[in-house]
Image: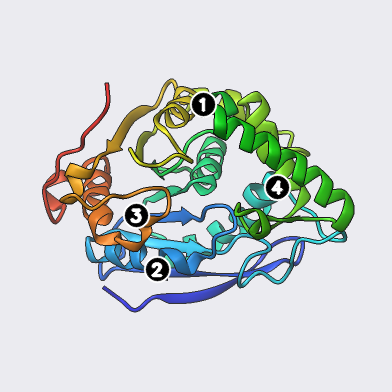
Amino acid sequence: MKPAETFSITADDGHRFEASLHATADPTAPVLLFLPALGTPSRVYRGFATALAAQGVQVCITDWRGMASSSVRASRGHNHGYQTLVETDVTALLAQLARRVPQAALWVGGHSLGGQLATLLAARQSPPVRGLVLVASGSVYRRCYSPSLQIGIRFLGLMAAITGALIGYFPGRRFGFGGREARGVMDDWLHVARTGRYEPAGSTFDYETALRRLTLPVLALNFRRDTWAPEAAARHLLDKLAAADRHPWIWGDAETDGQPLDHFSWARKPDLVAAPVAQWIYQHSTAHSRESAPNSYVIYSYK
């Protein structure tokens, strides 16, 4: 395993941000672009990336526009939404990543919102993606949630509208949800919450149709204690991928020797998750046979 390499990216509109590549000694090993949750800097996933690389999977992690290494911050004068994140920033990152690991099959995935946007990225198939790895992710369609959380989602929508009008962005940390978020990001998030559909403002790409046509292998790893990405939300997102080879996995306490994992705590115990995720990637990779994977794990699925 090589030391992580940090590199800079400049998007077509001049936005600058950083990513880090956790490479392996094998340049042909699969590479997973892993996208962060809402308001979460990439450094949160360093342990997970390091653990996956030790298992033979190369990993690239990056910061969202407006977060950490990003050259901009959400404000009245700087707004963006899902379209910019997927079609501008990640597109620029992928071009640089391809130059660094040209022989590696590309996998994409992410945590929470990162998993949703990774799914949209895969739907575009530009460049072609080998498979999807979703961790603690799912649709935010409010009907997938408990009555109390549905009220919370409505409250977030109200606060996003008020703060957007007053200060030009959503101060998520004040409400315990995300970080300093652009109005467009919250508008797109709330559109999915209301409709269950991915229709990023300003985009001409038909994501819903493209999602139905995807035929990739998809791992959806969710945690039984996770209230922000419950089983119903995971199912709703996977149901959009009707043609895909879907592998839902609800992780209970017994699979972690009694160590409870939830929406955020899994990233603080990366070794528990990294090994079986790496095994699954190898099992579903055309570039590497099942026998080349470092360990053997059983994938548990709900029916």
- Figure check: 139 above or below 35: above
Which residue is labeled 3 in the image?
A: 266
Q: Mark 3 or mark 2, which is nearer the start of the sequence?
A: 2
Mark 2 or 1: the one toward you = 1
Mark 2–mark 3 Cα distance, whole angstroms, equals: 13 Å
Which residue has dot 2 on it?
A: 46
Q: Are marks 4 and 1 in contact (CB under 8 Å)?
A: no
Q: Residue at x 39, y 75 (%)?
A: 4
- Say which label, 4 or 1, has the lower sequence index: 1
Q: Which residue lies under the disc numbered 4?
A: 185
Proximity of marks 4 and 3: CB atoms separated by less than 8 Å: no
Which callout, 4 or 3, points at the residue further toward the start of the chain? 4
- Classify mark 4: residues with Cα within 10 Å, few (<14), some (14-19) or many (20+): many
Q: Residue furthest bottom?
A: 3
Q: Is residue 74 left or right of residue 189?
A: right
- Residues tagged 2 and 3 counted as in contact (Cβ below 8 A): no
Pick whichever, 163 or 42, lies toward us: 163
Residue at x 52% of width, y 39% of height = 125
Give how far apart the Cα atoms at labels 2 and 4 are.
24 Å
**Is 233 rendered above or below residue 303?**
below
Question: Closest to the observer: 145 or 79?
Answer: 145
Q: Is residue 154 left or right of residue 149?
A: right
Front: mark 4 or 3: 3
